[in-house]
């Protein structure tokens, strides 16, 4: 009886583990940019907070990922992955990357912050519970294919950006707009403008404890969504903040 019970428990535990593993791993079939049928696998390494992306003999990863929120094909060539990032107190954040494959290599064709919700509590003015948020901010980007232009391939980024302040003199707004992103066949990335840079920039990298300063010169693809700007520089996406500060999106 004990042997039979132990066997049943072992099988049950294995089934639960198998189902849980499937929930953290996903597989997609798409067509590479050079016309081949391929499979792309996504897998979350929870202990390291890493999203592993594999295809044939190539492997890439995204760091600081807690979970996959959604993954779906945009047309047959592109895989859009929405993933949960580490936020903070009163802050939830998600990013979106668009993956493509060419010549057996995984490309990060787009990398943006696509969602965040933040509630700011001003402890200097009110410390009596229940406390209410002084400022509530929300930001959301939806990506969809454009069927009006065939070449170059385009997607539409629909943006909702909202900020509400409880202070009558505070800055509040509610914005809705759309941007058309084109595809650069040479670099395999999406962009909506190109910009010439020639200056020193401070670069933050999660792989390094210290920021570095680097001179960057050239013309680069840019995704500009309202006040948010993302630059594709030497095969890496960066988010540009105030001044000449770039935050690196590690992918390899």
Image: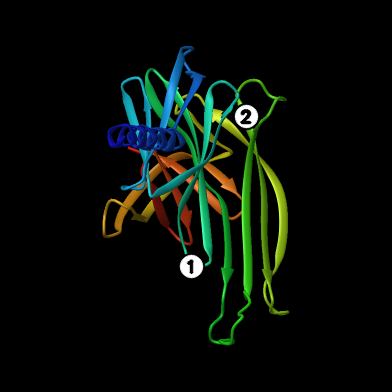
Q: Nearer the viewer, residue 66 or 9?
A: 9
Q: What whole-number distance in Å separates the C-alpha atoms at marks 1 and 2?
A: 37 Å
Q: Of the two numbered discs 1 and 2 on the same chain, state the one appearing first in sequence.
A: 1
Residue at the image point whose x is 63% and y is 32% from the top? 155
Residue at the image point whose x is 43% and y is 32% from the top? 22
Percent position of residue 207, x then y: 28, 51
Q: Nearer the viewer, residue 103 or 18?
A: 18
Residue labelled with disc 1:
89
Residue at the image point whose x is 57% and y is 72% from the top? 120
Label ID, residue 158: none
Mark 2 surroundings within 10 Å by alpha-carbon count, few (fewer than 14), some (14 through 19), many (20 or more): many
Percent position of residue 15, x then y: 40, 33
Screen quadrant of the C terminus:
top left
Percent position of residue 134, x then y: 63, 76
Label ID, residue 154: 2
| Comparing labels 1 and 2, the label whose residue is closer to the camera | 1
Screen quadrant of the N terminus:
top left
């Amino acid at each position: 009886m004990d042997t039979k019970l132990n066997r049943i428990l072992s099988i049950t535990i294995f089934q639960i583990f198998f189902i849980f593993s499937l929930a953290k791993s996903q597989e997609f079939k798409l067509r590479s940019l050079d016309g081949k049928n391929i499979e792309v696998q996504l897998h979350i390494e929870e202990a390291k907070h890493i999203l592993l992306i594999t295809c044939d003999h190539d492997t890439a990863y995204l760091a600081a990922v807690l979970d996959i929120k959604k993954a779906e094909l945009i047309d047959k060539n592109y895989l859009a992955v929405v993933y949960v990032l580490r936020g903070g107190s009163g802050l939830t954040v998600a990013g979106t990357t668009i993956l493509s494959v060419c010549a057996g290599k995984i490309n990060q064709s787009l990398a943006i912050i696509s969602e965040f919700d933040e509630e700011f509590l001003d402890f200097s003015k009110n410390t009596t519970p229940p406390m209410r948020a002084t400022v509530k901010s929300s930001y959301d980007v939806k990506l969809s294919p454009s069927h009006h232009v065939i070449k170059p391939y385009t997607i539409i980024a629909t943006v909702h950006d909202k900020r509400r302040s409880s202070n009558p003199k505070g800055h509040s707004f509610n914005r809705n707009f759309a941007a058309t992103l084109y595809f650069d066949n040479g670099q395999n990335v999406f962009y909506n403008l190109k910009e010439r840079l020639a200056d020193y920039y401070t670069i933050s990298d999660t792989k390094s404890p210290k920021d570095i300063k680097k001179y960057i010169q050239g013309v680069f693809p840019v995704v500009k969504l309202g006040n948010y700007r993302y630059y594709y520089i030497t095969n890496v996406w960066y988010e540009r903040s105030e001044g000449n500060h770039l935050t690196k999106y590690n992918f390899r």
